[in-house]
Image (cartoon, helix red, strand yellow):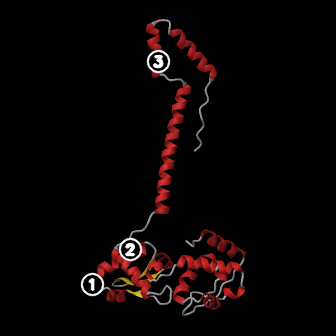
Amino acid sequence: MTISYPERDEGRAVTRRLIEAAAQFTPITAALAHLYGYTHPSQFEQDLERFQREIAEATNDHSERLERLGARINGQIVLDPLALQVAFHTLSMNDTGMMRAVSFESLQEAFPGDTKTALEDAVAELAHHGYVRTTTAMGAAILQYRPTGALFLAFDRVAMDFDTRSDAVEIARIWLDGDPALTNVFQLKEHLSWSGRRLNPALAALEHVFHPRRWSQEIHPTLFTTSVLVTPDERFKLRRIVNDGRVD
């Protein structure tokens, strides 16, 4: 919304002031003129009041938008303690860093002191925040669940002492350096001396950078992908990741 400062009509203002001045010659007319001026403000005064009101409304609206934006940027997801335990358990039991399914039955075995309903609610909470994806079946509200890359990004640093964000940025930096040999993930793994458990979540965090045809679709038992092709389009996106220091 554009707010324009009101402009005074000088001709109208002069005429009004002359009339008001003439009314000052007697007490009665002076009082009436004062009352008239209060109940009938000039067009400029009306415009000025409208202008001030629009400024106040725009400022308040802007403040509310900033507050909402700040809440989205700075807001933290608070998980139920059991959901957090399930998240840590899922990551600590994952030995490949791949997004492999976890059966709900095995989760129940790992948490014998918690009810089925409580565990279902915990997994549903993780799914609500995008940390897992669930699979249902006839007679089973949750048959199994599968961790997403967001789970590794959010909790791997605490659960496994792997900083997946920093690892992904490091890989992006390596691919920007332009050594074609290191776009082969087998050689990249050897170069970094990382376990598959550490490497795979970082690779998964970078998949969105690549066109599907430039991200190997080969299915490998221990690697999230086996090779990538870095073109100018990917270099632009990788450079932004390196500069920002983030992949999400």
User: Residue pushed farthest bottom?
Assistant: 221
**Percent position of residue 25, x then y:** 50, 6
Q: Amino acid at mark 3?
A: Tyr
Q: Secondary structure at mark 3?
A: helix
Query: Disc 3 designates what residue?
Result: 36
At a point 61% along the width and 29% down the height, the residue shown is 7
Location of the N terminus (image quadrant) = top right
Q: Earlier in the sequence, mark 3 or mark 1?
A: 3
Q: Secondary structure at mark 1?
A: loop
Q: Earlier in the sequence, mark 2 or mark 3?
A: 3
Question: Real-space Cα distance between discs 2 and 3?
Answer: 65 Å
Q: Residue 142 or 138: which is nearer the viewer?
A: 142
Circle 2 Cα neighbour tier, 10 Å, few/some/many (<14 / 14–19 / ≥20): some
Q: Amino acid at mark 2?
A: Glu
Question: Real-space Cα distance between discs 2 and 1?
Answer: 19 Å
Query: Disc 1 designates what residue?
Result: 113
At a point 39% along the width and 69% down the height, the residue shown is 78
Q: Indicate which label's residue lies in the foreground, 2 or 1.
A: 1
Circle 3 Cα neighbour tier, 10 Å, few/some/many (<14 / 14–19 / ≥20): few
Location of the C terminus (image quadrant) = bottom right
